[in-house]
Amino acid sequence: MEAVVGTAMNALSRHFEWQADHFACELSARLNAPEMSDMGARLGRALTTLHVKNLSTVWVDWLYSAYHHSHPTLTERLRAIEAYQTVKVKSADAVSKKEL
């Protein structure tokens, strides 16, 4: 029973981390603050720096990670940030094309 509850808690915690990363990526648009631009890239650099300083491993099996880690791995987070930024750029291009 403990394994099931622990895995469910890790999944919930990981979901909240995905939401926090997504929020950080769109922070500049929400605040309309140019000094907050490119927060996704900043977050990626900060996460990479933390992993290097903590000597964390980069490659972890996804099943091991789902069971033992309450946070997504560095590679998962960087891929999600990159994917969100790609979607954001595509949607901005679509909006600018509609305005023409």
Image (cartoon, rainbow, N blue to C red):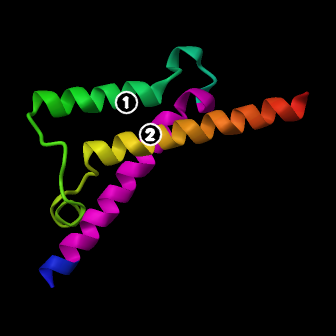
Residue extending farthest to the left is 55
Q: Quadrant of the C terminus?
A: top right
At mark 1, the secondary structure is helix
Location of mark 1 (residue): 43
What residue range appears in magenta? 5-30
Residue nearest the observer in this picture, 68 or 33? 68
Above-or-below relation of 42 to 60: above
Residue extending farthest to the top is 35
Q: Is residue 13 left or right of residue 89?
A: left
- The residue at the point 32 percent across, 57 percent down is 14
At mark 2, the secondary structure is helix
Residue nearest the observer in this picture, 86 or 13? 86
Location of mark 2 (residue): 81
User: Of the residues shown, which amino acid type is indicated by label 1?
Assistant: Leu
Above-or-below relation of 43 to 74: above
Is there a contact, CB below 8 Å, between mark 2 and mark 1? yes
Magenta segment's dominant SS is helix
Above-or-below relation of 62 to 92: below
User: Of the residues shown, which amino acid type is indicated by label 2?
Assistant: Ile
x and y percent of residue 39 in the render?
46, 26
x and y percent of residue 4 in the render?
21, 80
x and y percent of residue 13 in the render?
30, 58
Mark 2 or mark 1: whose residue is earlier in sequence: 1
Question: What number of labels is visible?
Answer: 2
User: Residue 70 appears in which quarter of the rendering?
Assistant: bottom left
- The residue at the point 21 percent across, 77 percent down is 5
Magenta-drawn stretch contains 54: no
- The residue at the point 45 percent across, 31 percent down is 40
